[in-house]
Image (cartoon, helix red, strand yellow):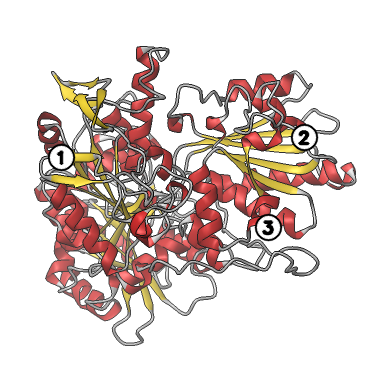
Amino acid sequence: MLLLKLSATDLLTLDRRDRLVPHLAARWKRFRGPASQGEREAWAESLIELAKELVAAERGDVQMLVECLPTGADAPVDVMLVGRHPTSGADSFQLIELKRWSSVTRLEADAAEFIVPGMEEPKPHPAAQLSRFHDFLMGEKGPLRGLSVECGGFTYLHQTRDEAVQPLFGPDAPTGPCARCYTLDSREEMLRDLREQIAAEGSATVAERFLQRIGVRNSPLLEAMNNSRGEDTVFTLRGQQSRVAQDVRDAVTSVTGDPSTAPVLTDVRHDAVFIVTGGAGSGKSAIGLQLMAEFQAKGLSVQYASGSRAFNAAMQDHVGYGDRAFQSYFRYFSSYITPPEPRLDVLICDEAHRLRERSTNPRPWMPQGTQPQVDDLLDAARVTVFLLDAGQSVRPKEVGTVQLIEEAAGRRGIRPARYRLQEQFRCGGSETFRNWVHALLGLSQEKPYAWRPDGLMHVEMADSPEELERIVRTEYHAGASARMVAGYSWPWNKPVGPEKHLEDDVRIGSWHRPWNADSKSGCANGVPPSRLWGVRDEGFDQLGCVYTSQGLEWDWCGVIVGEDMVWRNNRWVFQRGKAKRENGLLRIVTPGSHDPKVIASTVDEESFKACVRNAYHVLFTRASRAVVVHSSDPDTQTYLKTLVGKVEIQGLRPTWLNLPEVARRRRPPRQRKKNQSAKKNGQLGLF
């Protein structure tokens, strides 16, 4: 859990915009339930006081991690200050408890507890909680284990004097690196100690490293796989991810080996089925790819199936698999019309929400599916893992649901093991952003509300498509990964002529840009085929859609909202468009969606709305640091600007220049394809 990451200066700016407490309350509700009035008042008073003191100590750029609770800790700490030690240069952490206590009285029955006016229960010495958190951080399972860092802490009672809380300073008070207590009387001493413990500069770099260590910042999928080539460990799985992965490992051991060597998690004799659900960025693919690496290293027969050609093509191109090697391990759902013989040990089905009713083969002379596609997949392996998110189903004929899989497994006498992932690893680890997008698009019970910056994810509006392109292009040329995407609100013409020239289909005023190539091969001027648009440098100048961006992510993403979804009379209105041919090219007649699969007359209105909502959900959640938004509809643009607000906090804008060096992930070069006959330890080293 992490409610907020901001510098002291930016936190004060956020408070002046009246967004601090609402943001913290929304985050608290997600983790702990509704925030009490006392909690709201504490945030409004104590956090502001601490931020002001940091500014007074000339430490306004020091990062404040508010209500930080890494996995494994028993309770959060009010604030963590992170930075560099001014003398040693080591990473420095200060743990802070903020108390609004006016006075304390020692409890006679227990010298370690204190009576605080206004509180029903006795309270322990605040240094005791800080000490436990300190011991966790530095202990065997803590994120700072084995590191050479400076770590201490203190309590700040900012509304009282030494005399009123004298029992806290008694001879039997806790000792150690977190034992210090400051009041109004010792404020100057506290400011001096802050200057001695944390330098004025370098905090952002230390904060970024710490967020990576506690799993808030995760490497993008393709980068993680690229960096771990030849190794069995692709991802560090955390929390729920670890539990799911271990259960799958146990089941695979039971099914493929001696059943007595591992617990059987299902009530089946031979086969096992796992269903893992979770929103975009919840870590589903990380589980699947990590398990595949492990099982492949053990010599098990394992394959990874997906419903996304863009994801598979990006995997092959970016990470550098040879064609034969890739096809041996990465397949499509439609690849199992004829089941493998013998059956696979494990089949991992990513993006299972994209399952179709039946498998079809584009070559009519080849075998065609005769049963539900989900049955093809269950026939293919002894252990099948389905990873899905209903919120990313973007076509009417995508039928993958938990119910569908459970019913198919039930017909075989299998009771699947079900899991739901709640944590957020994409979009900078910002659940604030995920919840905001859900409310914005009507995918949750909440009504749309103003965006509240949290220091993890950045949102801004562009006044024009030219401005959107300028912002995203600037970051791309600086070294960040970036793409521009749009709703399917413009016709998509095939490449023109023998040279396969792309038409500028997306037109907003005088600004014209082409869609990514609608072809299986490259086009004029080095434009890559559609399946490689998201990873080839030559793809930046084209706009992607939901089908070519699903499963991918970039540092910055420009999202153009078209007229398939417009804001009218305080609600979203979804429109089907019409086009006609002019000189051989499709041109808009009626604004709206031009996705032929979605606007078909066979698609009812509710299904149409769901597909459009889910498509924008996918587009909005492709960025890991910043999303820039523009709507081609004036009324919608005005509405979105009222929600997002102006970019006033420059320190929050994660431009390449603003990012600390440790957070700058330059686009890695494409890998050469491996020699198809290359082996490592008797197996092909995929990762």
Separation (CA) of disc 2 from disc 3: 19 Å
Label 1: few (<14), some or many (≥20) within 10 Å?
some
Badge 3 amino acid = Ala
Can I make out residue 158 in this image? Answer: no
Total labels: the figure holds 3
Height in image: 351 above or below 258?
Answer: above
Identify the residue at horizontal 41%, vertical 65% (top origin).
210
Judged left or right of residue 279, residue 327 is right
Query: Residue 180's x, y, as percent?
Result: 32, 69
Identify the residue at horizontal 37%, vertical 62% (top origin).
537
Observer-nearest of 494 and 241: 494
| Element marked by disc 3 | helix
Observer-nearest of 34 and 447: 447
Q: Which residue is disc 3 drawn over?
A: 325
| Element marked by disc 2 | loop
Q: Which residue is disc 2 drawn over?
A: 339
Judged left or right of residue 495, residue 8 is left
Query: Residue 154's x, y, as percent?
Result: 32, 66
Contact, mark 1 vs mark 3 (Cβ under 8 Å) = no
